[in-house]
């Protein structure tokens, strides 16, 4: 079956002692020491730091400082950070914890534990901060979307109970007015079953969103569903949404069931051969792996020849993904999607000036004039750009994607949005 | 990864469409018209076509050197401009003039104004305007009879005169005869009774029937050779979204009622003849020249407003002009209001 995970059992795991950006920790183990699942590998230092438990049986083979790209939402850091890590070898993987255990937990206890490392929201906020910011009666928006409808349909079928459990837990932490399930391109029938499960918890309704590019970006999906969203004005949370993809809901459920630092094993989607959006050369695969698995081992499991370098690996979708350049890069909680794209499809530098073809206008989901806004931002006229709707930009990158002159329109708009933020919050 | 890997800001994948591919596809869409013109008018038309394209490429390269601007001949923009200029020229024009017009068009209409993407004026039409100012006599002498090379050799065309002023003159004669006047007749007209003259005038005008749009019987500009050759390419341009539909549609929505209204005016009866003589060129103007993305507005509303202006201008020019080049310049003039329309009707987002 398409939704059956490909299980990757690595020969070594590389676990950064610091999964969150703000947390500082020091090693609690020594080289050569054997560790058990749940045994803490790190000692937290300072506010926000959390101990890192071992996910597996194994032996500490090294304590290297390794460049690591931390996964996460839109606020993720660009590029790798040198982080102290624990390298585990001679691994033995335990069974996943019992599914019922987490249900015994009560709200306050959950609340303390829900600041899941690697579970940053779409705005780069930790989940508990998003929950704090949510107004009463906020909407829980579930994105039943992925590059392959069949994959998410299978996910809904197999993991329906866990998804509803995650929603139940979130409802105990924060009251929601309704659950809105955006169900494109996943099939309506599967989404209806999830809605039916949720109806005992809160009013749930389905809403179809357009296909095309909507699945690539939570904010695009919101726009496609007609939900107002303005990136620079407020966060999603303060607008009354908590946006969760199916994968994120599963991560929430795993976290609440198993405790920090997150789900074991990870389930991610790996998508290969995406030369040009929206066409894909093949359906994505569901991959089950353990946190700390080096990227190279996943690629080998996916059948990629390590000697070939004709593909670029992205953490995320082709539109918003961050490149993962080092095969030793550990895959960590928060990772949802791996995209492998041919190097030949990488954009070159701007090939020429704007020819006013208007394709960026046609594709812009919020009906902006990206080329003009980009020009204003580059000229330093951000105020003028704001008058023309810069703050409505959802930072989807479609303008850059479609531009035949290969102009970095999205990047210019992003710069403008940052300037707006800085001007507002620095004042 | 290999050290030459180039990574920019996200997104890291792009649509396959590129500026060059757009230009070349437009060239391909117009190639059947050019081929039909060459087949119809013979070797001189081929020379005009080649000279115009070469002149445009030379103008682009020269402009790049003069203004120290990076130009890329392989992106097809200069070739397209040369082809477009050729389609607005009479097929028997001296090739040297075609070369010079294209060279000037690219230099003055594009490179002087900032290069590709920054030009306010369509370079092909700028070249056409330069030719009409510098060499009006050469343009007037460049008319060939369609299929006139038959019986001689394909390489030699058969010179003739611009049919538009001839039909316009005939129309004026008919109007005066109907008004009871006896106008001065041009050389070659039969001398006879008023009724005979009227019949002769009507026979002449009947020669510009609707079939002229489909198959060339009367002399025309290279781009006016036949709707049959033009339509498939235009359909492709629209279906492949290489040309924005808004401007042509807004023109075609406004044009019929405007023509009907104008038909009640003093020049109304002439409109039918003018349309059959210039219909193919009109469609080329509407679909390609007036829809050139660089010289038309960006916003959707502005495109509609621009289309409205062009449509009204077209009706006025058809009704009152007897110059074959007049309505081509409409797109040139309309381009001047584009910045104003863009400022006035710019999209302001969803908020």
Image (tube, rainbow, N blue to C red):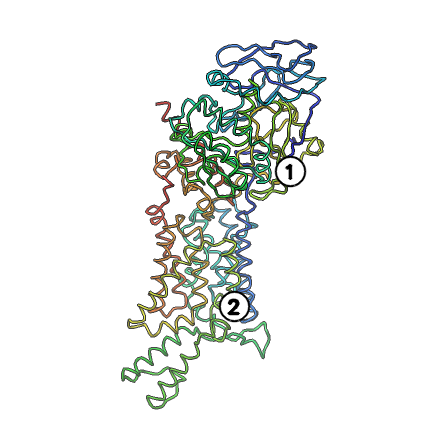
**Quadrant of the frame with the N terminus of chain B:** top right
Please identify the quarter of the rendering in which residue B258 is found.
bottom left
**Label 1: chain?**
A
Judge whether B107 appears above or below A34 on screen.
below
Is B146 placed left or right of B261 in the picture?
A: right
Label disc, if present, on residue A2 of the rendered structure:
1
Please identify the quarter of the rendering in which residue A68 is found.
top right
Residue B69, visible in the rendered structure = no
**Quadrant of the frame with the C terminus of chain B:** top left
Residue that mark 2 sits on: B228
Q: Residues within 10 Å of mark 1 (few under 14, many from 20)?
A: some
Same-chain status of marks 2 and 1: no
Image coordinates of residue A183 in percent, x first then y, are: 50, 39
Query: In terms of depth relative to the viewer, which is nearer, A318 or A143?
Result: A143
Question: Which secondary structure, mark 2?
Answer: helix
Is B349 placed left or right of A308 in the picture?
A: left
Image coordinates of residue B345 in percent, x first then y, are: 34, 47
Residue appearing at x 27%, y 84% in the figure? B180
Judge whether A12 appears above or below B32 on screen.
above
Question: Which secondary structure, mark 1?
Answer: loop
């Amino acid at each position: 079956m398409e939704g059956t995970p490909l299980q990757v059992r690595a020969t070594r795991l590389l676990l950064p002692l610091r999964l969150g950006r703000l947390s500082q920790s020091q090693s609690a183990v020594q080289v050569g020491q054997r560790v058990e699942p749940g045994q803490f590998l790190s000692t937290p230092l300072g506010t926000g730091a959390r101990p890192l438990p071992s996910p597996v049986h194994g032996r500490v083979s090294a304590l290297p400082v390794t460049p690591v790209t931390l996964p996460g939402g839109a606020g993720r850091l660009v590029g790798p950070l040198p982080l102290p890590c624990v390298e585990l070898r001679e691994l033995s993987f335990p069974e996943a914890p019992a599914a019922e255990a987490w249900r015994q937990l009560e709200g306050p206890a959950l609340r303390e534990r829900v600041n899941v490392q690697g579970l940053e929201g779409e705005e780069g906020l930790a989940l508990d901060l998003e929950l704090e910011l949510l107004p009463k009666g906020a909407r829980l928006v579930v994105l039943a979307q992925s590059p392959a409808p069949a994959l998410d349909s299978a996910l809904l079928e197999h993991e329906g109970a866990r998804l509803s459990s995650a929603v139940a837990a979130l409802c105990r932490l924060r009251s929601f007015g309704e659950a809105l399930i955006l169900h494109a391109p996943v099939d309506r029938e599967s989404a209806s079953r999830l809605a039916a499960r949720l109806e005992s918890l809160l009013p749930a309704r389905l809403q179809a969103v357009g296909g095309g590019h909507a699945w690539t970006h939570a904010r695009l999906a919101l726009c496609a569903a007609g939900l107002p969203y303005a990136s620079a004005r407020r966060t999603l949370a303060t607008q009354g949404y908590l946006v969760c993809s199916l994968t994120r809901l599963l991560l929430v459920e795993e976290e609440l069931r198993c405790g920090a630092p997150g789900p074991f094993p990870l389930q991610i989607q790996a998508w290969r051969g995406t030369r040009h959006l929206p066409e894909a050369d093949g359906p994505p695969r569901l991959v089950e792996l353990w946190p700390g698995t080096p990227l190279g081992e996943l690629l080998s499991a996916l059948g990629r020849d390590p000697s070939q370098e004709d593909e670029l690996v992205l953490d995320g979708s082709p539109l918003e993904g961050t490149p993962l350049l080092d095969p030793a890069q550990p895959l960590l909680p928060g990772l949802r999607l791996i995209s492998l794209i041919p190097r030949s499809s990488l954009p070159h530098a701007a090939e020429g000036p704007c020819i006013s073809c208007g394709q960026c206008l046609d594709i812009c989901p919020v009906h902006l004039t990206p080329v003009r806004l980009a020009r204003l931002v580059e000229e330093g006229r951000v105020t003028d750009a704001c008058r023309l709707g810069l703050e409505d930009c959802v930072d989807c990158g479609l303008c850059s994607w479609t531009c035949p002159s290969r102009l970095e329109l999205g990047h210019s708009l992003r710069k403008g949005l940052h300037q707006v933020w800085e001007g507002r919050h620095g004042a | 990864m290999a050290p030459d890997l180039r990574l920019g800001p996200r997104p890291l994948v792009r649509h396959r469409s590129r500026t060059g591919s757009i230009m070349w596809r437009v060239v391909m869409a117009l190639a059947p018209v050019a081929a039909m013109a060459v087949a119809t008018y013979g070797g001189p038309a081929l020379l005009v076509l080649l000279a115009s394209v070469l002149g445009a490429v030379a103008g682009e390269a020269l402009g790049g050197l003069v203004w120290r601007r990076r130009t890329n001949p392989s992106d097809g923009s200069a070739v397209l401009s040369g082809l477009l200029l050729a389609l607005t020229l009479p097929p028997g024009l001296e090739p040297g003039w075609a070369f010079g017009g294209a060279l000037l068009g690219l230099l003055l209409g594009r490179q002087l104004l900032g290069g590709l993407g920054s030009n306010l004026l369509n370079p092909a039409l700028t070249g056409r305007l330069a030719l009409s100012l510098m060499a009006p006599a050469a343009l007037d002498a460049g008319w060939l009879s369609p299929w006139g090379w038959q019986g001689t050799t394909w390489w030699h065309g058969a010179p003739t005169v611009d049919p538009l002023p001839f039909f316009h003159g005939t129309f004026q004669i008919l109007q005066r005869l109907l008004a009871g006047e006896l106008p001065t007749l041009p050389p070659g007209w039969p001398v006879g009774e008023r009724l005979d003259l009227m019949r002769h005038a009507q026979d002449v005008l009947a020669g510009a029937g609707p079939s002229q749009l489909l198959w060339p019987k009367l002399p025309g500009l290279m781009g006016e050779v036949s709707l049959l050759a033009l339509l498939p390419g235009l359909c492709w341009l629209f279906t492949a979204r290489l040309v924005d539909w808004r401007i042509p549609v807004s023109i075609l929505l406004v044009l019929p009622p405007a023509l009907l209204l104008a038909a009640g005016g003093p020049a109304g009866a002439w409109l039918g003849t003018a349309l059959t003589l210039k219909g193919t060129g009109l469609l080329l103007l509407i679909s390609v020249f007036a829809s050139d993305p660089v010289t038309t507005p960006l916003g959707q509303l502005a495109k509609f407003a621009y289309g409205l202006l062009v449509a009204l201008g077209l009706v006025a020019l058809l009704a009152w002009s007897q110059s074959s080049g007049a309505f081509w310049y409409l797109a040139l003039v309309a381009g001047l209001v584009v910045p104003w329309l863009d400022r006035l009707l710019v999209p302001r987002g969803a908020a």
